Image (cartoon, rainbow, N blue to C red):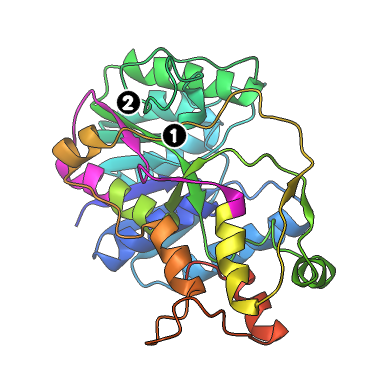
Amino acid sequence: MSTVLVAGAAGLLGSAVARRLAGEGEQVLAADFLGESGGRRALREARAAALGTLENVTLARTDLSSMMRTGPLLRRHRPAAVVNAALYDPDGPGLAPLIEVCRATGVGFFLHLSDAALYPDSPEPGARAREVEARDAGGDPYLAQRLREEALLEESGLPYAILRVFSVLEPELPEGRPSVQEMEALLKGGPASPFDDEPRDLLHVDDAARGVHAALRRKPAGEIVNLGSGVAVRPSEAVRALTARTGSAFSFRVSGPPPARRPRVADTAKASSLLAFTPEWNVAALVARNAIDRRPGRADKPAPVSRRVLFDWFRKPLR
């Protein structure tokens, strides 16, 4: 059975992709450098440990930006395909060593997960982001790295496809989980948000992993495809829906600066036609469904809940 290398397999999306592929019976080589420190390192270690319990997953703790490490790894395992979900240091060699080794070892397909933040401001109000639009890093070094990665892959001669991934949501939300104090403030009328309230295309991580799997199956060579929900959701709408059941007064005050560029919403026509991909999780509908009591006669009557239940909604808002 052929092997799929997942680069960045301890990250949020990389780990979801590795689990998805393993669940579909693929042999997965899950590679990650695990170079962070503190809470992020602990989280990545936990994801890697969970992958290590799966029978058809092989873990490799290695730096894929190093030619000396990447070459022996790929020659030993001979993956038929590569999914790159890794984030590389903008000051390092980035994706180039992995691409070079893939060419040398005859990898059959390279699927690169890029960033939808490369889309500039909408040319007209409400226009959905389309794959044919010009790319713009906007002075961000990490987005500039993404631009270089796409260009490297386009010039590599490898059979490849690029997925531009929109904002990914995951139920655990470890880095952004509210504190008990913040939740108490929310029950008393709503805290100020340190972020903007611009509508965002929010894609559940399970849908993102399904889209990656679909791209591996169909191999749309040479194509760039949006991977998003196609639905715009404001943070205030999500929070207001979740707090409706408490029966509390609510306010949402934005204290953060406006974004340098407004988040875009994906045009999903290409994903539908090339990958037969449609998200199963409609985030806006799901939040509303979790927040409103659907029993007869109760639709407009918020049902008070305990703080414990409310806290659990925010810790796992999409389950």
Q: Disc number at residue 222?
A: none
Label 2 is placed on what type of residue?
Answer: Ala
Label 1 is placed on what type of residue?
Answer: Gly
> Callout 2: helix, strand or loop?
helix
User: From the viewer's perspective, is residue 161 above or below residue 74?
Assistant: above
- Cα distance between the residues tagged 2 and 1: 9 Å
Q: Quadrant of residue 140?
A: top right
Q: Which residues are magenta?
A: 213-236
Give the residue drawn at x 38%, y 24%.
127
Give the residue drawn at x 46%, y 80%.
293
Query: Mark 1 = which residue?
Result: 71
Quarter of the image where the N terminus is located: bottom left
Give the residue drawn at x 46%, y 65%.
288
| Residue 304: percent from left, percent from top | 63, 85
> Callout 1: helix, strand or loop?
helix
- Verify whether residue 6 appears in magenta: no
- Of residue 222 and residue 269, the one placed in the foreground of this image is 269
| Residue 16: percent from left, percent from top | 43, 58
Q: Are marks 2 and 1 in contact (CB under 8 Å)?
A: yes
Query: Mark 2 = which residue?
Result: 104
Q: Residues within 10 Å of mark 1 (few under 14, many from 20)?
A: some
Q: Quadrant of residue 26?
A: bottom left
Q: Using residue 79 as the reference point, say whether residue 54 is left or right of it.
A: right
- Of residue 282 and residue 41, the one placed in the foreground of this image is 282
| Residue 12: percent from left, percent from top | 53, 53
Give the residue drawn at x 30%, y 53%.
279
Of the numbered discs 2 and 1, the one sitting upstream in the chain is 1
